[in-house]
Amino acid sequence: MLVDSHCHLDALEFDADREAVIQRARAAGVVQQVIPAIHARSWPRLRQMCLAHRGLFPAYGLHPMYLEMHQPGDLGMLAAWIQREHPLAIGECGLDFFVEGLDADLQQAYFDGQLVLARDYELPVIVHARHAVEAVIASIKRIGRLRGVVHSFSGSPEQARQLWQLGFMVGLGGPVTHARAQRLRGLAASMPLEFLLLETDAPDQPDAGIKGQRNEPARLAQICRVVAELRGVEPGVVAAATTANAGRLFGLPAVAAD
């Protein structure tokens, strides 16, 4: 059994065949999916989708790449949603210093606001950190008493160790399957399994086997196989550990094997 710890199944790219995508994921052993939001206007749609499908769990947050969609009152609205909906995490939130033109100060303000909510409501955070891992670590240290995952981790081994010491896990997905990603593959091969989550980030970040195509949660099985090969263990070892990690971090309900 596998948990896709980061998937955007509510994305428009899945509107034509979402039911089939969910069935393919289950057939591949992906029994649970954590689905982070990107802006406040997407929260109601995400909520309804997760209520309608077993094994789908929403997280509500404000993504740093969608600043033009955010409004000053959204952090207050997020607090109200947390109180009413009791989500398993806050996210997707974070910092993105790769995309040109994104206001870094405004990103930081929304990120800090969400970290404070996560601390106050004792929820994990799902963090986006592109060309911004150091700044993310500094923010986590500054706010304090946090836990969560930095998804699609692309930092250094030392940055990963800092995150583990702060109570954070790292999420690995499609990029680790590409032969050129030597640093990432080295991390996957050697890191303590207790800090690892697997993800697809579907419909984005396809693995090497479907390069240039739409990604989907069923591909998590391939990511698991690659990580297992890098570590020299059976895929079941990686599946069991990362499923347990996701359950522990997010408080996921136990799933009985079919």
Image (spheres, rainbow, N blue to C red):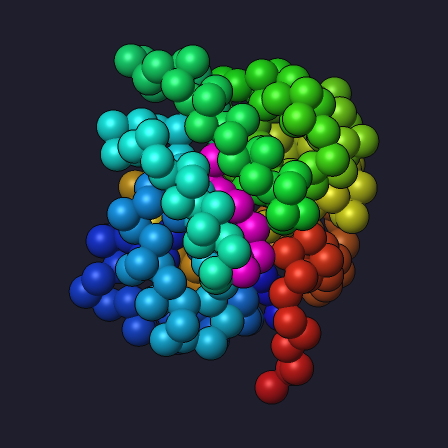
Does residue 198 lie above or below 127 as drawn?
below
At 63% across and 47% down in the image, what residue appears? 121
* Residue 64 point in image, percent of width and height: 40, 29
Quarter placement of the N terminus: bottom right
Q: Is residue 28 visible?
A: no
Relative to the observer, which residue lies in front, 17 or 47? 47
| Residue 191 part of the magenta-drawn span | no
Residue 242 left/right relative to 7: right
What residue do we see at 66% from left, 26% from top?
A: 143
Front residue of 88/228: it is 88
Picture layout, residue 203 above or below residue 256: above
Residue 195 horizontal/vertical position (percent): 74, 43
Q: Residue at coordinates 50% horizontally, 71% vertically from top-left?
A: 55
Q: Residue 201 at x, y = what percent?
A: 44, 46
**Residue drawn where x is 77% and y is 27% of the image:** 161
Number of marks in picture: 0
Q: Which image quarter holds the C terminus?
A: bottom right
Depth order, front residue of 106/248: 106
- Residue 97 quadrant: top left
Residue 254 is drawn in which quadrant? bottom right
Locate residue 226 relative to residue 54 in the image: left or right.
right
* Residue 89 magenta: yes
Range shown magenta: 86-93
The answer to which image quadrant residue 38 occupies is top left
